[in-house]
């Protein structure tokens, strides 16, 4: 197995997964008890004749396989259908909202990655000290806490009691979308990002802690100590080198959960991103939009996993040397 | 007192506590939860531990009832999803190689879509309410346990007693039932208990967003999403105490899983 083989294999896996996601979501949608015509028309009434002609026009009488072929060819052309609630193309709704969501998620992703790793390193290095114990119980508590409740506590403390941060929205009220400057955007993203960071740090921190302890107890670190290496150089040469890779794997693995968490955070802070949109779509029975967002998000996650696989190739000397 | 004994005592205490919530929850009648306008918007006191809401309903009673609902839904959902995990993991471990490949792809698939979004999708498409919620949670939480079952089964797959049994002409099902389930059982029970908190948290989250239980049901998610409206006015106790109780319940169940795994997990027990 060489490098190109490795890359091609992972790439094919990604494509396969994306195809499967669309098959699964389509199957779920076709078999759901929700009547698409009723959803589309809302409270109005249709006669049987009108219903028949709509069914004919939409191709609802075709077999499921035919409908899937039609639907997926449209997807490949970038046509996700029209959103029922927003009355415009699904893709344009998504592209409108995706920016704010990506901004929130990427800041969370970076913050949790860096902070979580450092905290984990600290906890493992000073194992069983008071600092370690306190941090560990905080981590365990936060990993048992629902994201939206943390968000609500943040709102109570920072917005209501202290009045430092706004109650919600990713932009000031009464200002047009294109006039919002970057500082306002950051200012409105701080609380949701902080919430998500608090919720997702324990995952990586606790994992790094146990890895650090594992390395510090290994024979090679014992030997390094016997050689007279300083604690600092042990940390640098052995601990960090051996714990960065698992930390990156874990962090990229949590990509999909951060997406899930951001749905909750966005809803608590009424932050206008994909998360609030998917809830609107779900509550309003807007199936095309719901499917569109699910597929787009899964594509993001699978690309994230693919990048993680590539990163492995560059960081982990073992994979590289195996092949050459 | 050695560690085993200590673990057992902790287990008994936690189980008793969960049972207490269940029993007291089932004793709370609708009348006790009915609005009482003479007691509106009270702060926590000895009479109302968690205070009352804008309709004068006692928040402590509603929280207990909500926790009871959470426990019921959480246990059904995690039981179903652990059975799915057992079947899928068992299939991957005992059947030919290509089944294993398919199972791994399906696991990657389910893990790739964010759980919350998948639950929303499933619960909307399956018709909302308790049924959609249960199906959604059960279909998303089996993956990690299925991986564990699969790797356990693969470990004994080529052991002599399994090979001998196969030579005797025993079916795959018989081998799985008689030889593999006993091996997997401790990990399965621990996995089942550890799925539970995830299921509860997702139940609360999905209900909070408005997809789960109906707004009339006293569920933690409903209580918290109602209290969102009053946060701005500084009414913090409506959100604080119910949420805290949920966190405590989840922490307790985690502790239960931890101690159970100290008792049952052969890898840890030897330490």
Image (spheres, grey):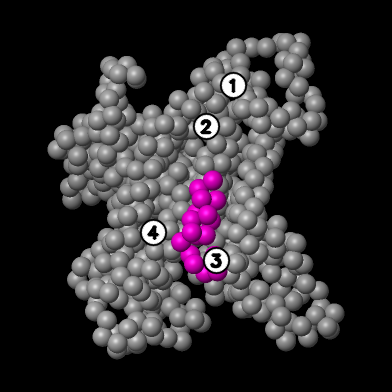
Give the secondary structure at mark 3: helix
Q: Earlier in the sequence, mark 4 or mark 1?
A: 1
What is the C-alpha distance between the residues marked 3 and 2? 43 Å
Main SS category, magenta section: helix
Q: Are marks 3 and 2 in contact (CB under 8 Å)?
A: no
Relative horizontal placement of residue B201, taking residue B165 as reference (left or right): left
Foreground of the two, A311 or A288: A311
Q: Residues within 10 Å of mark 1 (few under 14, many from 20)?
A: some
**Residue to which mark 1 is pinned:** A82
Q: Chain of mark 2?
A: A
**Residue to which mark 2 is pinned:** A282
In the rendered view, tell whether residue A314 sits above or below residue B269: above
Kindly report which numbered mark, 4 or 3, lies closer to the viewer in this rendering. 3
Q: Are marks 4 and 1 on the same chain?
A: yes
| Residue numbers of the magenta segment | A303-321
Q: Position of residue B154 (x, y in %)?
A: 66, 74
């Amino acid at each position: 197995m060489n490098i190109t083989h490795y890359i091609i294999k992972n790439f094919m896996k990604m494509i396969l997964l994306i195809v499967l996601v669309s098959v699964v979501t389509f199957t779920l949608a076709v078999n759901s008890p929700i009547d698409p015509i009723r959803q589309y028309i809302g409270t109005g009434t249709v006669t049987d004749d009108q219903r028949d002609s709509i069914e004919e026009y939409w191709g609802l009488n075709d077999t499921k396989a035919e409908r899937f072929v039609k639907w997926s060819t449209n997807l490949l052309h970038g046509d996700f259908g029209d959103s029922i609630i927003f009355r415009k193309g699904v893709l344009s709704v998504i592209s409108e909202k995706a920016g704010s969501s990506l901004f929130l998620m990427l800041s969370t992703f970076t913050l949790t990655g860096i902070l979580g790793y450092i905290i984990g390193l600290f906890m493992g290095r000073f194992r069983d000290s008071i600092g370690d114990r306190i941090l560990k119980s905080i981590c365990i508590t936060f990993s048992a806490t629902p994201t939206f409740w943390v968000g609500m506590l943040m709102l109570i403390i920072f917005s209501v009691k202290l009045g430092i941060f706004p109650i919600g929205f990713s932009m000031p009220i009464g200002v047009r979308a294109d006039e919002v400057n970057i500082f306002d955007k950051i200012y409105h993203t701080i609380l949701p990002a902080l919430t998500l960071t608090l919720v997702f740090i324990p995952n990586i921190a606790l994992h790094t802690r146990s890895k650090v302890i594992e390395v510090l107890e290994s024979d090679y670190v014992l030997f390094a100590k016997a050689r007279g290496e300083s604690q600092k150089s042990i940390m640098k040469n052995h601990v960090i080198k051996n714990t960065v890779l698992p930390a990156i794997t874990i962090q990229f693995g949590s990509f999909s959960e951060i997406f899930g968490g951001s749905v909750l955070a966005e809803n608590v802070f009424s932050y206008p991103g994909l998360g609030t949109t998917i809830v609107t779509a779900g509550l309003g029975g807007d199936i095309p939009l719901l499917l569109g967002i699910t597929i787009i998000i899964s594509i993001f996650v699978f690309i994230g996993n693919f990048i993680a696989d590539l990163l492995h190739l560059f960081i982990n000397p073992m994979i590289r040397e195996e092949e050459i | 007192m050695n560690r085993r004994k200590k673990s057992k005592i902790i287990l008994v205490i936690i189980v008793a506590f969960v049972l207490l919530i269940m029993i007291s929850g089932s004793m709370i009648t609708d009348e006790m939860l009915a609005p009482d306008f003479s007691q509106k918007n009270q702060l926590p006191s000895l009479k109302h531990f968690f205070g009352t809401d804008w309709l004068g309903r006692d928040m402590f009673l509603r929280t207990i009832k909500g926790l009871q609902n959470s426990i019921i839904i959480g246990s059904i959902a995690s039981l179903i999803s652990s059975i799915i995990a057992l079947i899928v993991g068992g299939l991957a471990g005992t059947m030919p190689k290509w089944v294993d490949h398919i199972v791994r792809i399906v696991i990657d698939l389910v893990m790739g879509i964010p759980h919350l979004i998948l639950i929303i999708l499933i619960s909307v498409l399956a018709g909302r309410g308790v049924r959609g919620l249960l199906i959604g949670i059960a279909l998303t939480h089996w993956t990690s346990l299925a991986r564990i079952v699969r790797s356990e089964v693969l470990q004994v797959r080529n052991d002599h007693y399994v090979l001998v049994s196969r030579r005797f002409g025993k079916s795959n099902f018989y081998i799985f039932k008689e030889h593999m389930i006993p091996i997997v059982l401790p990990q399965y029970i621990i996995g089942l208990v550890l799925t539970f908190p995830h299921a509860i948290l997702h139940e609360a989250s999905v209900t909070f967003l408005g997809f789960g239980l109906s707004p009339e049901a006293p569920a933690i998610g409903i209580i918290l999403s109602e209290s969102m409206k009053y946060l701005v006015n500084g009414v913090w106790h409506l959100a604080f105490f119910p949420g805290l109780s949920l966190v405590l319940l989840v922490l307790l169940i985690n502790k239960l899983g931890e101690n159970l795994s100290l008792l049952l997990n052969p890898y840890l027990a030897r330490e």
